[in-house]
Amino acid sequence: MTDFQTPAEKFLEGLISIPSVTGREGLIKDHLKEAFEGIGLDVELQHVDTDRYNVVGRLGEGPIRLMLCIHTDVMPAPDEELWSSPPFSAAVKGGRIYGRGAADAKGPLAAAMEALLRLKRQGFNGSVALAAVVEEETGRSVGARKLMEAYRPNMGVILEPTGLRMATAHKGAIRAAITVRGKAAHSSIADIGVNAISMAVEALKDLDAYRSQVMKTEDPALGKASLEVTMIRGGARINVVPEMCRAYVDRRLVRGEAVESSLQELAQVVKRTAARTGTDMDTELLCAYPPSEADEGSGVARLVASALERLGLPGTAAGFPAGCDMWAFVAKGIPTVILGPGNIRQAHAVDEYIDREGLRRGADVYEEILKRSVSP
């Protein structure tokens, strides 16, 4: 008996072995095309840019009633020496499968592939699709937005690690760069320069105070709004007063918060610091997406809830604390929810894993959902 036993586990082994980090999703295109065709799906490749393609597998003819959508990009693993096994080589240990993307989100993809394989063998009479899209991890939803240019399914399910609990809402995000400009000088005569890093520290103090204000906003399903400084870059040499420092901010939005007004608030905090310190500072938006939600009484929410309950799982809705491609579907008026095996706490982590039982149950759930999509 091999370590990888079910079709989903075998699919996942192959998916993890391909290091499709964001920007390099072209590495997985041919593998997915061949795998989807092996399941018996009709495959369509949608060019996004460079060598990156969305891979869409369709089962049945006519308008797509239900589309499952999953991102193919994963986070890098620069800390490989900290992993107990190579991150891009799936490893079975006890009741878990380890590897980069095991939970986020190649595990859900593998479960969906097994579900479609089962339906194909059963002579499924419906019209569904599985779309594997590029670049979700940056927050830009590049692949999902491109997908929506060519496809209009009646309903959508975004495959993310929700622990097989249906989510009908997710947080939005603003990702911004704050640039602080000083004046370079030799460090032995530093008083003739302006230390951009020191001035950036002042900005960070004000941002920390603003963070406390932001976190007072709380959503019953999504939790607290947040603001975190996640990267800082500055300086050129150890003996030079730095003339530039850049801080990167990740601001998460809950329902009721808008991208534009929240960005304006952030920029105003930086402007006040600049005025107080007499330093040149500005705020640049890198990307943003809004919080998104689906009506819990919508057809897709009722369909997914009934499928979960049929299999003995809770059908009540929850919130997804991270971002995902749901907003790109909702922006086009497509009722959409989020559902998948795995735990979001494993996303981006060292020794990322998915429980084998969760993966098995995920295939069962997706099969049940796809079957139920046939009924109007």
Image (tube, grey):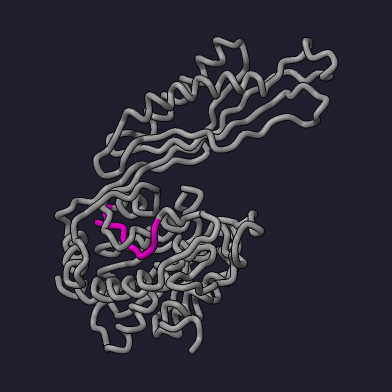
Q: Is residue 241 above or below residue 253?
A: above
Q: Is residue 237 above or below residue 313?
A: above
Residue sitting at x 73%, y 29%: 235
Residue 50 place in picture, x, y as percent: 60, 61
Q: Is residue 41 above or below residue 140?
A: below
Image quadrant in which the C terminus is located: bottom left
Residue sitting at x 49%, y 24%: 207
Residue sitting at x 37%, y 79%: 114
Residue 145 place in picture, x, y as percent: 42, 54
Residue sitting at x 46%, y 58%: 143
Q: Residue 282 magenta-drawn?
A: no
Q: Is residue 254 visible?
A: yes
Residue 304 place in picture, x, y as percent: 22, 64
Closer to us: 45 or 36: 36
Closer to us: 362 or 257: 362
Q: Which residues are magenta?
A: 333-343
Q: Count the marks: how many? A: 0
Q: Is 35 situated left or right of 373 in this image?
A: right
Q: Residue furthest front?
A: 94
Q: Main secondary structure of the magenta part?
A: loop
